[in-house]
Image: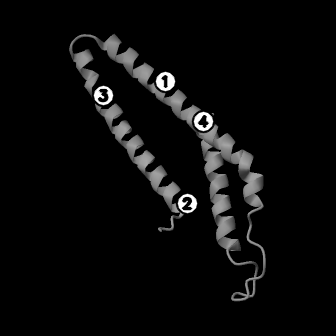
């Protein structure tokens, strides 16, 4: 029987999806470079229209994704905040074990949410 770590599995799945997203970005960039053939063939209007459509659709999809993720995690902030480690940290003579790393990670999430809000808006 193997023990699986759900956090590790989630990180690996997300890393795979982000790698796929990067491959899609590379493919879109290659496709966009090929558009210059339209202009050199005397069809600059076609290049302009396709480029505008691509950028508009990409920004709309990216903005929608960011807004969805931002809303999802902002709604969970209260529950996440309550996950602050409790109890004394005898080794340090301070707050509970994991208190510092917890609040550092929580602050990092809040910063990412603010950045997502600016980019999605």
Q: Which residue is denoted by mark 3 in the rendering? A: 31
Q: Is residue 36 left or right of residue 107?
A: left
Q: Which element is circle 4 on?
A: helix
Q: Residue at x 67, y 59 (%)?
A: 107
Q: Earlier in the sequence, mark 2 or mark 1?
A: 2
Mark 2 Cα within 10 Å, few/some/many (few <14, many 20+)? few
Q: Earlier in the sequence, mark 3 or mark 1?
A: 3
Instruction: Give the number of the mark in front: 2 or 1.
Output: 2
Q: Which element is circle 2 on?
A: helix
Q: Earlier in the sequence, mark 4 or mark 2?
A: 2
Q: How is the image coloured?
A: one colour
Total numbered badges shown on the rendered structure: 4
Distance from Cα at disc 4 to Cα at disc 1:
13 Å
Q: Earlier in the sequence, mark 4 or mark 3?
A: 3
Q: Earlier in the sequence, mark 2 or mark 3?
A: 2
On residue 120, the disc is 4
Q: Which residue is denoted by mark 1 in the rendering? A: 56
Q: Which element is circle 1 on?
A: helix
Q: Earlier in the sequence, mark 4 or mark 1?
A: 1
Distance from Cα at disc 4 to Cα at disc 3:
25 Å
Q: Position of residue 64 (x, y in %)?
A: 58, 32
Q: Position of residue 109 (x, y in %)?
A: 64, 55
Q: Quadrant of the C terminus?
A: top right
Q: Residue at x 73, y 52 (%)?
A: 77
Q: Which residue is denoted by mark 2 in the rendering? A: 6
- In this rendering, the answer to whether 2 lies above or below 17 is below
- In this rendering, the answer to whether 26 lies above or below 76 is above
């Amino acid at each position: 029987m193997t023990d699986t770590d759900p956090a590790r599995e989630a990180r690996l799945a997300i890393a795979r999806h982000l790698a796929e997203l990067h491959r899609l970005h590379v493919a879109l960039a290659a496709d966009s470079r090929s558009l210059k053939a339209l202009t050199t063939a005397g069809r600059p209007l076609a290049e302009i229209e396709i480029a505008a459509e691509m950028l508009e659709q990409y920004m709309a999809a990216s903005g929608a994704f960011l807004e969805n993720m931002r809303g999802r995690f902002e709604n969970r902030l209260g529950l996440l905040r309550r996950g602050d480690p409790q109890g004394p940290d005898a080794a340090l003579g301070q707050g509970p074990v994991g208190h510092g790393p917890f609040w550092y990670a929580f602050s990092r999430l809040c910063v990412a949410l603010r950045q997502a809000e600016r980019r999605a808006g």
